[in-house]
Amino acid sequence: MPQSPRFAPSWTRRWFGAVGLAAVSSMALAAQPGTPAIDTGLHVASPDWRDQIIYFLMIDRFADGDSSNNDQGGKEFDPQDRRRYSGGDLAGVEQRLEYIQGLGATAVWITPPVAHQWWDGDVGYGGYHGYWAENFKAVDAHFGSLADYQQLSRGLHGRGMYLIQDIVLNHTGNFFTYDGAWDGKRPSHNYRRNQNTTPVRAPSQWPFSLNNPRRRADLEAAVYHWTPNIVDFSKLEQERDFQLANLDDLNTESPLVRQALRDSYGHWIREVGVDAFRLDTAYYVPPEMLRDFLDADDAKAPGVMQVAKASGREAFHVFGEGFGIDRADEEVQMRKIERYATEPDGRPLLPGMINFPLYGSLNDVFARGRPTAELGDRIHRVMSVHRDPHRMPTFVDNHDVDRFLAGGSEAALRQALLLIMTLPGIPTIYYGTEQGFKQPRQAMFAGGFGAGGRDHFDAKSALYGYLAKITGLRRAHPVLSRGVPTILGDSAAGPGALAYRMDAAGQTSLLVVFNSGETPVLLDNLDTGLLPGQALRSVFTINDGAPSPVADARGRLTFELAARSGYVWAIDRPAAAAQAPAAGPAPPQLRAQRLADGRLQVNGETTGEATLKLVVDGQLATATAVSADPKGNFSALLDTRSLLDASIEHRLVAWLPEAGSASEAVGFRASPEWVLQAEVSDPSGDDAGPSDRYRYPTDPSWGENRQMDLLGARAFTAGGSLRLELDMHRVTQVWNPANGFDHVAFSIFISLPDRADGVPALPLQNANMPAGLNWQFRLRAHGWSNAMFSAVGASASEDGEVRSPGAEIVVDKDRHRVSFLLPATALSPMTSEQTTSLAGASIYVTTWDYDSGYRKLSKQGSGHTLAGGDGARDPLVMDDLLLRLPAKAESSVDAEALTSPPADK
């Protein structure tokens, strides 16, 4: 017999009925006559969310405050296994609040604490993360009790901090699936209950327990959509109604489901005093359902905004997850995200959405060396596309993507963190970032997964101290949380300068400047609106020794930026007119003409004899020194063959270092000539690993596409740069990957001849290079990451030294081709102007897949595990090939003569 709805008339419901749902302050709550006393430790007024800094943590991986709840007897607990529970709980979070507050965070966002599916044998993974709910109104036994959760809330509020709970509206855990053909008109056809799940076979909470379409009452209740997995994310019906990764999709159009979800999450506001919700998988529910969830006028289960107001929270925050990353110069995902924040008629919907597109751009620029103009453009679009960017959480990594340090350097991480602290949005720090974590779900406490047997709550670590400084910077300067950025300078050609000014009414403006490159750059002719002779006041610098720029006679700034630097200056309002700068040499005059052979003829004039530098795209390491004659005339021929993008306009200036002045910039375009150096074919159907015994995972998202089957490759060079084209059996985009391909990870190794350095081991792949070869450079890329390494520090168990810039990736889905473009700077010493020759180089390519590490391999395999071997010792290589470039660079090559046999399996 179906269980009746459990909208229990607790004292909180009775209290709400007595006083109505009008918003009141937390002090007024305790003063209501004839009502129970309200725990003001649980219920506090909302903050201005623009001023908050969030610390995001996974309960199971953060701190173990009560070891007695670790193992619940379902074989779900094993701290050595990343798929299972490690033992973190709510009591542990409460015990570490001083550590979190010392970092400068003002709010704590926790993963879902609700009761959930502990182990799913169908997919071979555990629900330690909390997103597989089976009872939305109960605390999971691994995490503690309701009293523990209330104690965490009191602990936060007592420190002036706030509690953010992760919630899910789209799905429950995986309790049923469809085998074989699916018939939408017959939900019971090919329906199968998951028999390999603990601790329950179905949700224990009504009405979510009505999950068997073979029972008439369940079918008529229509709590679920009765659908199989999403196989095409481009189809709205599948995105909204099908199962995401085997998770049972709730019928969020149903009034019964909507009421149950409102009741469930209103419960946590009333009983625990939650201050905000982060809404998981917002894309997968219709926006109109969110209006009901927030504002429904229902006496049994009011909208959560009404519940929050009745607890004194006038500005309860709800921010959604829309996992979408736009490529440069695009805003498709940005506009999709905004549809969940603003309705078509302009009315606000969700108060905020997580800023994934900004995350994508800042990672591309700081970790991978993409042009800073891409980040400048993204910042501009954030301010123009989004109604309220100040309430959109910003981040550099989280639990669903690679750690920043898995493919970026610590210097780049410091820049990325400073960026989110100096832009509109709510900066969000993912736990462990302050301790230099490289694994996305590594535990902070000694007994947890990947912790190495020691705690990681080191308040004296360098990154912890750095974060404390930049959170302090944000708090000290309200213009950073309330202001509007104006992009003043960036580079369209590659790594280099990015400059923006933050302005807000009644606040001192700040100038924020970065150099994302590995070598010093020149920032020239920056127009900041300063008066001639006006100086800037330094308020923060990543490294020691901030410049002290002074505006020239035109009110512009020209100065050097150290490698991987970041600066913040205050633009004080002068009490009186600034003193005009002393007269000096006039800025040089410059002209340039591109010749037929691709070189650039440069001519110009300056004042008398002088030594100048001709600087292209701000790059001082490759600047050309030139001397003017007694009349001040100078000329030079510049080689532009290393400039690869014919679509962008490069900038050339003549700089007088001693005078600190630069000419007006001259624009020009390059015309690179790509020369085919090697081509190789690879047999179709040999994607089965060593001895042809590996098999793909069984999850339907893989299908019969054989995404790891290499069919051939071509290598082109241009001025020391490399373009590698890989032909595949099939390119898929099942999971809407940012890089344009999924279910395959490419590891590309470059071996240079006559080099004594390098290593033979393929890091973390249980394999070595083909006989006689060592690699010096390595690229690893899958659908959401793109990381470049050198062999410095590399071994069988270590990636090596992170490099920048990384590769530009181009996908031609129709031709089943993935191309990687590596600029010459990616294959040369990072602090040198020398270009590495690729003559005689070997390029070794392997395929596998990657999911917070190379995908698991086991004897039997599973939905997302490859089969046919032992992942602890067998090679993690599905297919491979080898190209050998000629010993001498040729203007053209005989492709047949350069064809190389496939590498041995």
Image (cartoon, helix red, strand yellow):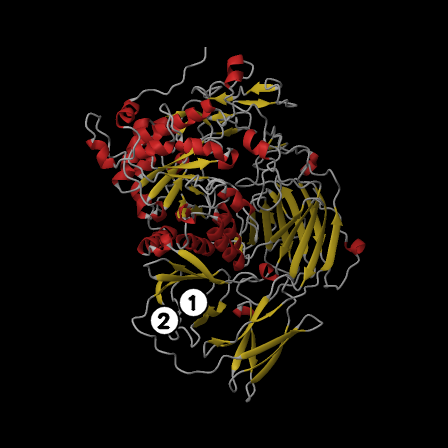
Q: Is residue 532 above or below residue 870?
A: below
View extreme (top): residue: 1
Say few, some or many: other residues with alpha carbon within 10 Å of mark 1 (under 14 / 14 to 19 / 20 or more): some
Label 1, secondary structure: give it.
Answer: loop
Instruction: Tell me the number on the disc at residue 535.
Output: 2
Q: Foreground residue, 506 or 115?
A: 506
Image coordinates of residue 889 in percent, x first then y, are: 72, 63
Question: Could you tell me which residue is drawn at 71 percent across and 71 percent down?
Answer: 597
Question: Could you tell me which residue is drawn at 58 percent across and 19 percent down?
Answer: 192
**Residue 605 visible somewhere in the drawing:** yes
Say few, some or many: other residues with alpha carbon within 10 Å of mark 2 (under 14 / 14 to 19 / 20 or more): many
Image coordinates of residue 728 in percent, x first then y, are: 70, 43
Image coordinates of residue 169 in percent, x first then y, are: 46, 30
Image coordinates of residue 683 in percent, x first then y, are: 75, 42
Q: Foreground residue, 133 or 677?
A: 133
Question: Could you tell me which residue is drawn at 39 percent across and 66 percent down?
Answer: 546
Q: Quadrant of the N terminus?
A: top left
**Residue 864 visible somewhere in the drawing:** no
Instruction: Tell me the number on the disc at residue 528.
Output: 1
